[in-house]
Image (cartoon, rainbow, N blue to C red):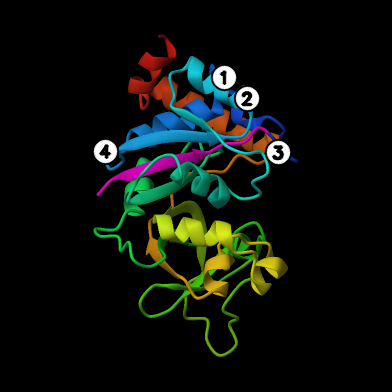
Amino acid sequence: MKVVGIIASRYGSSRLPGKALKDICGRPMVWWVYQQVAKSTALDEIYVATDDARVEGVCKSFDIPVIMTKDTHREAADRLQEVSEKIFADFYIQINGDEPLLNPKYVEAAIPETVPQDVEYGTNLITKMKNPVEVMDSSNIKVVYDQDFYATYFSRTPIPFPYRSIEFDYYKHIGIIGYNKKMLDFYAQNGPGRFEIIEGIATLRFTDYGKKLLCIEVDDSESLSVDTQMDLDHVRKIIREKLDSGELDEIKELLHK
C-alpha cells in the first residue's frame, strides 16, 4: 500500500500573515513541519502543497518536494484532491503546515492496516480533552462517534450535553486526516452540507453525506497549531529549549548545513 503525506501550507493567514515562512530558530516553519513528518517511516513520499510562489521557492531552496496548487481552494482537502490527480497513492495523509511540534507517531496512527478502494473512506485522529477550558474553546472541534468508532458529528460546542450523566469524556479533532482517492474526489465534487454551513467545520461534509470517517484515538501531546504571534513565540521557546537540551540533536545538525 502506497501512503503519501501532504503538508498543506499556505502563505495567507488572517491572524498571522505569512506564517508558513515565519522564522523558528533559523528555519521557516514549513521546514520544521517537514522535518517532523519525515521522521515517520510509514510514508512512501512527502510533499508540501501550496498555492504561493514564496512558499514554493523556500521549499525548493531546502530540497523539500513541493507541488503548486490552485489559489482558489478554501480547504486543505481540496488542495489534497488536486495533488491526488498528480501523485498516485492508496492513501493520502493531510498534515497541517502550521504544527512544527507535530509528533510523527500521529502520522503513523492515521494509517489503517487496510484501506478499501471501492468506497469513500477516511480516518480522523482524536484525543481526549483533560482541561474544561479546552472543552469550552470553540476553536477545539469536539467529536462524537458511534460504537464502531465512526464519526457521527463534529461541533464547536461541547457535545454531548451532560444532562443525565457526567461520566464521559470529551474528545477533540486533531488536524491529521487520512483519505483514499474516492473520499477526496467526493469532497471536491460535493458542496458543503447543512451542518458544515452552520458550524464551519470542513470534516462535517463527510458526516453530512453519511461517509465513513474512522476516529482513531491518540494520546495528547505538546503539538500546537501556530495561529497567532503568541503561539509562534511559544513554539520558538519550546524548540529552542529542545535544541539546547540535546533532544533535537539530529535536527541541530541539519541547521548547520
Disc marking residue 41:
4
Q: Position of residue 211 (x, y in %)?
A: 47, 71
The residue at which mark 1 appears reads as 57
Q: Is residue 29 above or below residue 119?
A: above
Q: Amino acid at mark 2?
A: Ala
Q: Position of residue 248 (x, y in %)?
A: 37, 25
Q: Amino acid at mark 4?
A: Thr
Q: Are marks 2 and 1 in contact (CB under 8 Å)?
A: yes
Q: Residue at x 40, y 41 (%)?
A: 5
Q: CA distance from mark 3 to mark 4?
A: 31 Å
Q: Can residue 183 be seen in the rendering of this structure?
A: yes
Mark 1 closeness class: few <14, some 14–19, many ≥20 residues within 10 Å: few
Disc marking residue 13:
3
Q: CA distance from mark 4 to mark 1?
A: 26 Å
Q: Is residue 50 above or below residue 134?
A: above
Circle nearer the N terminus (3, 4): 3
Could you tell me which secondary element the residue under label 2 belongs to? Answer: helix
Q: Residue at x 50, y 46 (%)?
A: 80
Q: Residue furthest top?
A: 257
Mark closer to the observer (4, 2): 2
Circle nearer the N terminus (2, 3): 3
Q: Amino acid at mark 3?
A: Ser
Q: Are marks 4 and 1 in contact (CB under 8 Å)?
A: no
Mark closer to the observer (3, 1): 1
Q: CA distance from mark 2 to mark 3?
A: 15 Å
Could you tell me which secondary element the residue under label 3 belongs to? Answer: loop
Quarter in which the C terminus is drawn? top left
